[in-house]
Image (cartoon, rainbow, N blue to C red):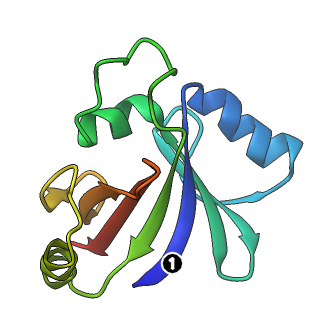
């Protein structure tokens, strides 16, 4: 696995987009105001992502609190993997309990699977479609 980024799961995407782009002055490398996901350069080859929390909640089937941010995830740690199915099977064999099965996300341009660490933090493995 190769660490890819930390993705903040935000309730106020446009406000956060403006904050990271205009207030902090980070270079936006992907995404626009009014969309659902943006990535900002925070170092050479290092990015910080923001993503609408309600969309991630749907992806990981944690929609019981869609109208409140309390109880929803605030961030996700993202790992890019060469072969999602192979990594998924290896992690399953190691006892990882997944939140969802590998899924194609054509709108995102990736295939994903999510799981949690023992403390409940959300992790994602992905590979490009």
Dot 1 crowding, Cα within 10 Å, few <14, some 14–19, many 20+: few
Residue 79: horizontal and vertical position, in percent? 42, 73
- The quarter of the picture where residue 56 lies is top left
On screen, residue 78 above or below 58? below
Nearer the observer, 118 or 53: 118
Quarter the N terminus occupies:
bottom left
Determine the residue positioned at 70% across, 67% down.
41
Picture coordinates of residue 127, whole percent (x, y) = 28, 75
Q: Nearer the viewer, residue 113 or 47?
A: 113
Query: Would you identify the image quadrant in which residue 83 lies?
Result: bottom left
Q: Residue at x 26, y 42 (%)?
A: 60
Task: Answer with the quarter of the image where residue 84 lies.
Answer: bottom left
Between 90 and 41, the one lying in front of the other is: 90
Placement of 58 over or under 114, stated as above or below: above
Q: Residue at x 45, y 39 (%)?
A: 36
For label 1, the residue is 3
Considering every residue shown, the one lying at the far top of the view is 67
Query: SS of the residue at dot 1?
Result: strand
Q: Quadrant of the C terminus?
A: bottom left
Residue 16 lies left or right of residue 111; in this view the side is: right
Q: Is residue 35 left or right of residue 6?
A: left
Residue 14: x and y, percent?
62, 30
Q: Where 113 falls versus 72 (above or below)?
A: below
Going 15% across and 59% down the picture, which residue do you hit? 104
Residue 110 place in picture, x, y as percent: 27, 65
């Amino acid at each position: 696995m190769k660490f890819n980024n930390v993705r903040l799961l935000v309730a106020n995407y446009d406000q956060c987009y403006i904050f990271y782009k205009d207030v902090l002055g980070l270079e936006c490398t992907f995404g626009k105001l009014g969309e659902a996901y943006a990535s900002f350069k925070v170092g050479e080859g290092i990015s910080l992502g923001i993503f609408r929390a309600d969309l991630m909640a749907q992806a990981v089937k944690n929609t019981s609190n869609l109208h409140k941010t309390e109880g929803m995830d605030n961030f996700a740690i993202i790992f890019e993997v060469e072969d999602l199915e192979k990594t998924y099977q290896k992690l399953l064999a190691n006892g990882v309990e997944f939140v969802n099965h590998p899924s194609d996300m054509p709108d995102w341009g990736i295939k994903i699977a999510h799981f949690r660490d023992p403390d409940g933090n959300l992790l994602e493995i992905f590979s490009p479609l």
